[in-house]
Image (cartoon, rainbow, N blue to C red):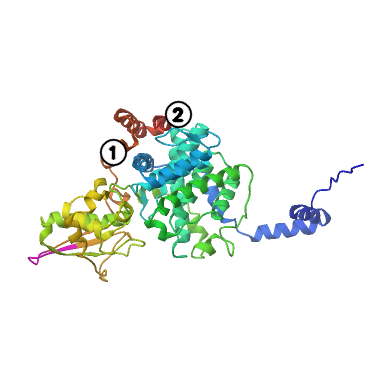
């Protein structure tokens, strides 16, 4: 006769429960002492803060900037539909298939949430035309939009729900940016945006504060990204991974998956491994406001390419216009400003779009030659002109004098020197399209209509979507916008 063994394997949790039952007074007393002496876990404190936000807490500018992020991200994603890197990942995702939970933009195919957000985030990131955060050069809005629209399609969340999640997620990404600033070098900013997307996902999935705290810890155990990858397709791959990681973490926490309560701040934890090791709880868990991060630090790309180059590009255009400079008369283009990490300074003509969008000499040469820069300038026809080949070799970097001051790490000063000995100089700190200078709907709409045509939707549909975005907070179901993208 076969006797079935019903004995369960002994686990760590069973051992602890047994110890508590055998020595209840000792166990409870020790637990009480530990609880009273131990400060709240950082993940829990942050989750309580982010969970409590309501739409009524948002300022009018925070709401406006959230809607601008939607318009900018979808426009960038439309351009991304033509990028080979995004096509490859979309093809793999469709090949793998799975539960039809949310739609790929400009395609309509429905895939699991985790795969959909990866593909949609990559579509936006691949075109190098998404938003940035002035502090971190992080494309926070890309992951937030991908996450929020996918979950809204699944849950029926409203426009107000989505805009609240975007603003709160932007705030969360900023706090994690504070944690890693001054920490380990060589990390890509996708590590930061994953936490903002995790908070947005947790809110829209209806997670409790405790579950959101676990989701943040799971993300901390999952994130990655190497800055040097910025100058290849790895850039958008890391952006897609940030959204994928956030979605996975929130779903796992929703299904009762847990992680260390103190994974962020413990020795060997997130702060210790990736950040500066300092825990300023009061600063990291400070109340939101009076000015929201999405108001102050959002920068919408009004031009393609690495956003950190845009102030110097704008300064070059200003200098060329100021002196009505003939490109043939230029003998030097001098740039100074804070060093731009992972940006190409080498004076050479870019071979392709990836090189062009990260080449400071190319940006400056084009600004001087054309007194303009737009999405046509990242095509081979514009890159390989004789005037550009000459001007890129005239670009010099000059150390910032001690007397100079930039409020933002991106600032740049450009001086054009001519054969006649004339010098024309301009300094740009916060770039056009950024919070400190004010972001205009007219600029966002110009970008939107310039890029949305790449998504192959009818022009009338694109206009209807722009109208819907303007009134997004009135939308009972945010999935109405996603359906228009098919």
| Labels 2 and 1 touching (C-beta < 8 A) | no
| CA–CA distance in space, label 2 to label 1 | 23 Å
Label 2 vs 1, first from the N-terminus: 1
Where residue 62 sits, quadrant-wise, is top left
- Which residue is disc 2 drawn over? 476
Badge 2 marks a residue whose secondary structure is loop
**Residue 434 as seen in the image, left or right of residue 238:** left
Tell me which residue sits at (7%, 65%) in the image. 420
Residue at the outermost bottom position: 402
What is the quadrant of the C terminus in the image? Answer: top left
What is the quadrant of the N terminus in the image? Answer: top right
Badge 1 marks a residue whose secondary structure is helix
**Residue 326 or residue 131, whichever sits in front:** 326
Tell me which residue sits at (43%, 58%) in the image. 188
- Percent across and percent down for residue 406 are 29, 62
> Can residue 80 be seen by looking at this rendering?
yes
Where 431 sits versus 60, above or below?
below
- Which residue is disc 1 drawn over? 445
- Percent across and percent down for residue 193 are 45, 51
**Residue 68 as seen in the image, left or right of residue 27:** left
In the image, which residues are magenta? Answer: 415-422
Crowding near the residue tagged with mark 2, few <14, some 14–19, many ≥20 C-alpha atoms within 10 Å: some
- Percent across and percent down for residue 396 are 22, 67
Q: Is residue 420 magenta?
A: yes
- Percent across and percent down for residue 367 are 20, 54
Where 11 sits versus 414, above or below?
above
Residue at the outermost right position: 1
**Residue 81 or residue 171, whichever sits in front:** 81
């Amino acid at each position: 006769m076969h006797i079935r063994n019903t004995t369960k394997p002994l686990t760590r949790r069973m051992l602890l429960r047994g110890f508590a039952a055998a020595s209840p007074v000792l166990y409870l007393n020790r637990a009480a002492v530990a609880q009273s002496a131990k400060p709240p876990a950082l993940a829990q404190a942050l989750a309580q803060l982010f969970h409590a936000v309501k739409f009524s807490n948002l300022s009018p500018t925070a709401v406006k900037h959230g809607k601008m992020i939607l318009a900018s991200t979808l426009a960038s994603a439309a351009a991304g539909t033509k990028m080979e890197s995004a096509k490859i990942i979309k093809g793999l995702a469709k090949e793998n298939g799975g539960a039809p939970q949310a739609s790929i933009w400009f395609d309509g195919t429905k895939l699991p949430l985790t795969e959909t957000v990866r593909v949609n985030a990559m579509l936006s990131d691949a075109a190098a035309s998404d938003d940035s955060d002035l502090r971190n050069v992080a494309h926070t809005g890309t992951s937030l939009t991908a996450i929020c629209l996918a979950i809204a399609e699944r849950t029926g969340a409203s426009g107000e729900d989505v805009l609240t999640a975007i603003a709160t997620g932007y705030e969360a990404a900023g706090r994690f940016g504070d944690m890693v600033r001054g920490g380990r070098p060589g990390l890509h900013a996708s590590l930061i945006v994953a936490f903002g997307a995790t908070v947005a996902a947790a809110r829209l999935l209806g997670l409790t504060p405790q579950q959101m705290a676990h989701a943040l810890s799971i993300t901390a155990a999952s994130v990655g990204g190497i800055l040097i990858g910025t100058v290849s397709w790895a850039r958008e791959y890391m952006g897609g991974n940030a959204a994928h990681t956030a979605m996975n973490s929130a779903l796992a926490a929703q299904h009762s998956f847990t992680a260390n309560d103190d994974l962020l701040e413990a020795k060997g934890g997130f702060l210790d491994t990736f950040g500066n090791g300092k825990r300023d709880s009061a600063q990291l868990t400070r109340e939101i406001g009076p000015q929201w991060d999405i108001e102050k630090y959002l920068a919408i790309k009004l031009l393609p390419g690495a956003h950190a180059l845009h102030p110097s590009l704008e300064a070059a255009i200003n200098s060329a216009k100021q002196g009505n400079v003939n490109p043939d008369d230029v003998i030097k283009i001098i740039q100074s400003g804070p060093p731009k990490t992972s940006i190409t300074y080498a004076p050479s003509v870019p071979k392709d779009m990836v090189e062009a969008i990260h080449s400071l000499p190319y940006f400056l040469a084009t600004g001087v030659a054309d007194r303009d820069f737009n999405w046509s300038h990242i095509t081979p026809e514009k890159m390989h002109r004789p005037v550009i080949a000459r001007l890129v070799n005239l670009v010099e970097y000059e150390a910032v004098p001690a007397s100079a001051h930039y409020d933002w790490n991106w600032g740049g000063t450009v001086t054009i020197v001519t054969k006649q000995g004339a010098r024309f100089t301009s300094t740009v700190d916060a770039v056009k399209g950024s919070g400190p200078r004010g972001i205009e709907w007219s600029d966002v709409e110009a970008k939107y209509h310039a890029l949305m045509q790449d998504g192959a939707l009818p022009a009338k549909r694109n206009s209807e979507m722009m109208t819907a975005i303007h009134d997004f907070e009135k939308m009972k179901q945010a999935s109405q916008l996603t359906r228009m993208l098919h």
